[in-house]
Amino acid sequence: MKHSTQKLMVTIFMVGMLVVGLVITPGMSQAALKGNVALVIDVGGRGDLSFNDMGYKGTEKAAADFDLKMVEIQSASAADYLPNIRNAARSRSFDLIIAVGFLLTDAVATVAGEYPDQKFMIIDSVVEAPNVMSIVFKENEGSALVGALAAMVAAHFGYPYVGAVLGIEIPVLYHFEAGYRFGIDWGNRAYAQKTGTDPRTGLLYTYTGTFSDIAKGKEATEAMLAQGAGLVYNIAGPLGIGDLQAITEAIKGKGKEAGPPFMIGVDANQDWMGDGHRVLASMLKRVDNACYNAIEAVVKGTFEASLIVMGLDVQGVAMSKEPELLTFMEFGIGAGKITEKDKDDIISNWKNMRAQIPSWIWNAVADLEKQIISGNISVPTANTLADIKAVRSKFPLTR
Amino acid sequence: MRLSGSLDELKKTVGAGVIGFAVSALIMKVYGYDPISAYSALFNGAFGDSYGVAESLANATPLILTALTFAIGFRGGMFNIGAEGQLYLGALAAVTVSLFHLPSGIGFALSLIFAVLAGIIWSLPVAILKAVRGVHEVISTIMLNWISQFLSFYLVARILVDPLRAEKTISIAESARLPLLVPGTSLSYGIFVSVFVAVIVYFLLWRTVIGFDIRAVGHNPVAAAYAGIEKWKITLFVFLTGGLTAGLAGAVHVMGRPPIYAIYSGMPSIRGLGFEGLAIAMIGRNHPIGVIFAAIFFGGLLAGGRMMQLLAQVPLEMVRVVEGIIVLFLAIPELIRLFSFLRKAKLPLIFPYKRS
């Protein structure tokens, strides 16, 4: 017994030496190459088929186009935000550090002060520092379009409500909510004008308090469907996967395959999810373009520490159309959700789905878009709790 | 614990750790990552320079305290997994104090005191249910963890919310923060609080009468009862002390962690610290001094894990797998002891579970 223990110890020691030897010998120092870009992501993580994946996609494309090395850094905890960004800056090997998402604001602001020569770009937030480019979107404008669409489609199919599943109560989400409310109200009026009856489509909304717990999205959507929601707008990144599960179960429970009820996707073009006929439209927020543009600016020497606001006019936000559907299906193929040969079915399902909505509804939404771009209509937004409360009381959308 | 015994434990730990590292290296290799550059990044990030050491210690700061919660319970033969819920409320209690504008010294002291009290109060039902009705602590702590979680969600989003920034609570007043020990890192003076408390717990368990009684109950509750030790007193003491350290863990984390000194909605910065403490207690053989080293090692894994992504391009998911395997192997010797203890004591084997 004693002998065998000793033998075991010797074996363990030998294995240990082997591993230590392997670890210690090769080059410890990492060569600080120019032509690197870091992408730091918050706890929501990759695989959301939405916001974070788009940041990845845009950065990856730029890295390929400009021959850069891309390093992705995910955060296991919110306590990692600061160290992750600081580590990247400390390594002094990145031409640009991209912070994807609002929650990284304080960490970027802190590290930008510590490393004034390091260039940063942050999405969805404004950091005022001489080395930070801030890119934000007019989510209220895009949300107004899908809100108008949702209200009219719900009325068309006889649903009393539309829904919205939101994440954490942050100012960015207030932009969505404010625009959505305005859009629903506009859609109700447009429907009344066309048909002569005011549908008074109401809004059911839930702030789930999470951008990562997919089950919460499903629970919230189930509750909304039970109350008569005809469309549910995903405003919580990955939670859309749960939203769609609930919608799919409801549809299949009726022995059908295609909606209504429908989901409305967010950030990415998520229309391909649900076989192409359960997600009616998506509010695109081109995080990918933002990342690409920032990297391009660094490469071309035009990087500026400025605030860039991307609205409907520059296609920073948009309602989904067919061309992007093809691009974004690659997401699903990459994630193993769909395969190459599903593509044709999805596209024909998608076309059939959209064709069952009367064309006057689509035209009305297009008209709203034109008026927003031309400045005839200004969509309200909200940055604080007080702002959003004011919007809520202006557009209560209760029944 | 005698020196030769400690040496033996150390040998077992090192052996288990080596196997853990080797198995992880193999898995990384299989999935196409370079284990050599990965481990090089891990060790450099964890203990390669003063910055790495500071980050490792910063990660260890709350974990030492939550591990103590479990370790104290374990020494008394109790399976206290309530640190998670007590930690949330400790952190929130510390934040609550900053609602009021208090003079600097008072605000700081009150934050710590409130956090400790919150932890103790949240462990009180567990202690009472156990002492009076014999309710198993695994059941009651799991239930209270959930209640604490949803209560905390509510408090973060509704009561303590920053009126200008809805995604987080108000920040701890500047005068009530634990100052940074090393500027430009995440390490605050909180590490001294944690180590100090661990040393106190050591003296409590091994140098006082009540500590002797706790360990006697843990070794053999029947014999302890026969010797006249009143178990309900021990139960109460064990859980309340555990609540104290868990509550304090929440306070040192939120008061000492830059840059926001606040809690985000959904609590992504503090969730899991209580359960991680459980693993650390196992690695540290449920000994307060062992816990200090285990927590620093675990903190190093976390700090080095970040560098694995940055320098070796190992994705976070694989980093977590590596960390998990190493921790599992390190805990095996203590797990074996736990299982044989449970078998001898004819206790049911109940596994706590965690839903992400």
Image: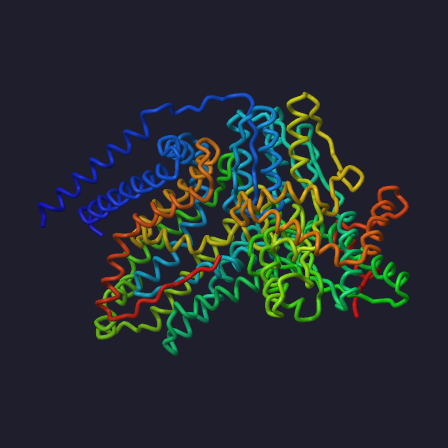
Q: Residue at x 43, y 66 (%)?
A: B141
Q: Is residue A78 left or right of residue B335?
A: right
Residue B344 is drawn in which quadrant? Answer: bottom left
Q: Is residue B148 above or below residue A98?
A: below
Depth order, front residue of A384/A190: A190
Depth order, front residue of A105/A254: A254
Residue B67 is drawn in which quadrant? Answer: bottom left
Answer whether residue A167 is visible to the viewer in this image. yes
Which of the colour schemes (rainbow, by chain, secondary structure, one colour) is used? rainbow
> How many numbered discs?
0
Residue B66 coordinates in the image, percent (x, y) = 42, 54
Depth order, front residue of B191/B23: B23
Q: Residue at x 71, y 69 (%)?
A: A228
Residue A36 coordinates in the image, percent (x, y) = 55, 26
Q: Residue at x 83, y 67 (%)?
A: A199
Residue B217 coordinates in the image, percent (x, y) = 27, 67
Answer whether residue B47 is visible to the viewer in this image. no
Q: Residue at x 75, y 44 (%)?
A: A318
Q: Is residue A21 left or right of residue B187?
A: left
Q: Outermost residue toward the bottom?
A: B133
Residue A63 coordinates in the image, percent (x, y) = 58, 28
Q: Quadrant of the C terminus of chain A?
A: bottom right
Q: Is residue A304 left or right of residue A395?
A: left
Q: Is residue B62 above or below residue B353?
A: above
Q: Is residue A30 left or right of residue A167?
A: left
Depth order, front residue of A361/A221: A361
